[in-house]
Every structure is written in structure tokens, then in C-alpha cells.
Amino acid sequence: MGVKLIRYSLNDEISWGIEENEKLYRISSDQPLKEIIQSKIYEIEDKEQVKETVNICSPITKDAQLFCLGANYGTHREECGLDANKPPFNLFFSKASSSLTSATSDIICPPHVELLDYEIELGLVIKQTIQEAVHVTEGNLADYVAGLVIMNDISARDVQMLEGQWLKGKSYRTFAPAGPYVYLLDEDEIQCIHNLEIILKVNEEVRQQASTIQLLYKPAETLTEFSQLLDLHPGDVILTGTTGGVGLTLNEEMVQILQDKTLNFKEKKQLFVENQLQSNRYLRHNDVIEATIFSEDGHIHLGTQRNRVVMSKVEKQGRG
């Protein structure tokens, strides 16, 4: 079995621990995730059980780079008005690491954001430094992926789609719930990456459900392409994409409106927001998002995120 690596706060002190048989054991004081991965301190035998109630922190530390794949499931491509088949190229973007938050923290919606959306994603935690082009295969994937983590790519669709700014629309503080823990894989578990169930609920209603076998660009080819482009380091995270069922839906008419250069920004925003709110799927104040990823046989379970949405008073007045 792999290792459930937990970062937690107790008495205002942040520490690292591991969960074994539903018990938490402290292994280290707080330090970057990359140091934990490289030192393998989680393998120590002399560890103390934590018997007090703790607060879970993001297991991805803010020194990490967050890179993402866009439209990497056919069902999500369809609801975005795209061809469901695998495209000729991968779509890469990034999120600011300051958007990281824990699996139990509130998601704070900025006052001006009207279309707050969710995206459950499997996160790949990088194992070693990559500073040159490498060929990652199914056979050597375990050399480059240390573990897995649940990520939620929270998105301000009105900013992302209307302004054309993906980084901005996806990087507000608290827009990247991570955890509750990083599952460090045993080498013989690496192929489980391709057969994990992902489920996201909003207020107990299933909104997203799929298997990672449906990923269009698989982890090995994605890491190969990333290595040709930029440096990766231990503790960095690749968000592999989300499946269908998000709030955003784009038909041909709406795509044309977004591309229409004869409309000014105010007109375009009014049409887009009114159209999108008709689905009644965007997040509202006090909504609870629950996200979980696991293997069907129960061998691997990445835990469960439960995050509440908090909007400003202005937003609550405007949207109920």
C-alpha cells in the first residue's frame, strides 16, 4: 500500500504526518512538500501518534507550480462546444500557487464574480526534477510521478471566458482546494492512475462522474510534452483535466457571441451571464462541494474534499 501523507495544524503549529489504520502519526515539522518527497522521511519507523483533533492543511505547499490541462475529457469538450474527440494538441495553462487551500476550507468568491464554477481533477505530484526533454512511458511513469491528490480547479467563468484570461479566472485565492492528503504510490500501483473513479457533488447532487480511463491525453504523454517545454520539480502538480458536468455550457450561438467583435464588453457580458445562469448549475453562497477519487476495487482512495462556498454580501443579495 502507498502512503497517505497529511499536512495539518495543531495548536497553531503546522506539521506533516501519515495516516495508518485510521490513525495519524507525526513525522516532521512543516517544510515544503518537495523536501518530504526527496528525503523520504515518511519511511521513518520512529513516529508519534497524534491523538488530538487537527485541522487539515493543503498537502501541496505554495512553493509548488500548478500546471493544468484544459478540455481533456470528451464530455467536457462537448459541453464547451468542442469536438469530443482527442484534439491534435494538448491545452496547457497554469494556476497561481497562492490559490491553494485545504480540503475543508471555505472557497471565497470575489464580489465581482457572478459565474463561479467547479472542476474536479486528478492531480499528479511530480517525483523528480525534470530539466530536459524526457520520454515518459507507461514503463517508467513511476520514476516521474510520486503520488496523487484530489484537486478542484475552481473557475470564475465570467473572467475566464469574457476577458480571455485563464490564469486570472482560475487563480483567485482559495480557487485550488487540494487534498485532504497526497497518496504516495507504491511502484506497483502506478497503473491505477488509468482506472480511478472521480465524483463531484454539489449539495449531495452528483454533478460530475467519470473514470480516468477517459482522459484524452494520458499522464505519460502529457509529462513527455511538459518536459519539452519547461522545468518541473518535486512537489509540483499537474492537474489532468475535468470531466463533463460543470456549470459552463457553450452552444454555437454563445460561442459566436463571445467572438463577436461588434459587441462591446458590457453587452457581451450581459448576454453571456444571463445565458449561463439559466442552467442553475453555478455555485451559490453556502453551497457545499464534495469531491472524491478512488479505485473501483477500493485499493486506492484519495479521501474526500468538502468545501463550502462563501460569497460577499453583495453577491448574496444579488443571487439569493
Image (cartoon, rainbow, N blue to C red):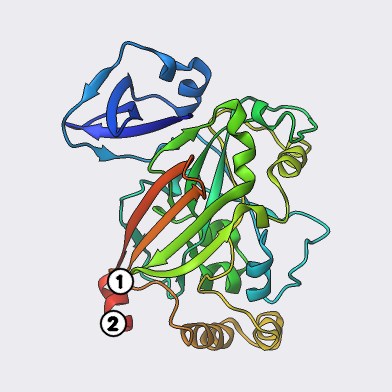
| Label 1 with label 2: CB-CB less than 8 Å | yes
- Lateral position of residue 61 relative to residue 254, left or right: left
Under mark 2, the amino acid is: Gly
* Residue 82 or residue 302, whichever sits in front: 302
Q: Residue 229 at x, y = what percent?
A: 76, 39
- Lateral position of residue 235 relative to residue 41, left or right: right
* Residue 206 or residue 306, whichever sits in front: 206
- Residue sitting at 77 percent across and 66 percent down? 85
- Label 1 vs label 2: CA separation? 8 Å
- Lateral position of residue 309 relative to residue 117, left or right: left
Q: Residue 83's image quarter?
A: bottom right
- Residue sitting at 29 percent across and 24 percent down? 25
* Residue 301 or residue 222, whichever sits in front: 301
**Number of callouts in the render?**
2
Residue 192 to residue 3: above or below:
below
* Residue matched to label 2: 320
In what quadrant of the picture does the C terminus appear?
bottom left
* Residue matched to label 1: 285
Under mark 1, the amino acid is: His
- Residue sitting at 33 percent across and 69 percent down? 203
Sooner in the amino-acid sequence: mark 1 or mark 2: 1
